[in-house]
Image (cartoon, rainbow, N blue to C red):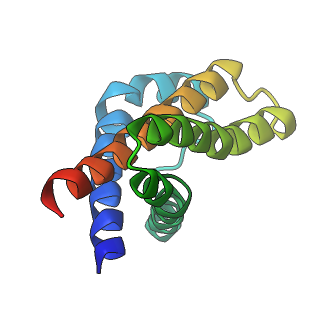
């Protein structure tokens, strides 16, 4: 049950932050650079699967090891690395294989991935520390 709670806190945090990011903060940025690639019909099942998989990874590779060590510095390091690895995999692959993929999108996305991983795992870590 603890794992479900930690996963839920992380997922909820990620969803809120990503909605703000995609819907408001970076909306014009992506429209400017990726207009040719963006769809009017989001495939929500694919997005939901991504969010679930990403946050399962955060739980297993970042949150639980950091709680075991009772170390927020471990969480910072692991979450930034997790965000880097996951988002760089996507963005650098796109940059390498999609004609005219903007390098600016690659850099901004990777930074966003590191931030959202840190914020989401931090929420779960502090939930555990203060409410469990």
* Image quadrant where one finds the C terminus: bottom left
Q: Nearer the viewer, residue 87 or 27?
A: 87
Q: Is residue 18 above or below residue 67?
A: above
Residue 21 in percent (x, y) is at: 36, 34
Judge left or right: residue 25 versus residue 77: left
Relative to residue 41, is residue 78 depicted above or below?
above
Quarter containing the N terminus: bottom left
Q: Quadrant of residue 23?
A: top left
Please determine whether, in this image, residue 96 is positioned above or below residue 100.
below
In the rendered view, does 32 fall on the left or right side of 132?
right
Q: Residue furthest left?
A: 131
Residue at the extreme top: 104
Residue at the outermost bottom position: 1
The residue drawn where x is 44% and y is 58% is 68
In the image, 47 versus 12, the foreground residue is 12
Coordinates of residue 114 in the picture (x, y in percent): 52, 34
Is 82 on the left-hand or right-hand side of 28?
Answer: right
Front in this rendered view, residue 82 or 63: 63
Q: Position of residue 97 (x, y in %)?
A: 85, 40
Q: Residue placed at 72% from the left, 44% from the top?
A: 89
Total numbered labels: 0
- The percent coordinates of residue 13 (x first, y second) are 28, 50
Q: Is residue 76 left or right of residue 3?
A: right
The residue under the point 56% across, 31% down is 109
């Amino acid at each position: 049950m603890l794992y479900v709670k930690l996963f839920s806190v992380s997922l909820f945090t990620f969803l809120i932050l990503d909605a703000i990011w995609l819907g408001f903060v970076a909306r014009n940025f992506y429209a400017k650079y990726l207009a040719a690639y963006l769809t009017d019909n989001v495939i929500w099942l694919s997005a939901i699967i991504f969010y679930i998989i990403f946050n399962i990874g955060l739980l297993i590779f970042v949150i639980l090891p950091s709680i075991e060590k009772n170390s927020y510095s471990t969480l910072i390091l692991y979450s930034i690395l997790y965000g880097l690895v996951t988002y760089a995999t996507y963005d650098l692959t796109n940059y390498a294989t999609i004609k005219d993929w903007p390098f600016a999108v690659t850099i901004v996305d990777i930074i966003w991935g590191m931030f959202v991983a840190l914020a989401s795992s931090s929420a779960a870590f502090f939930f555990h520390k203060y409410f469990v």
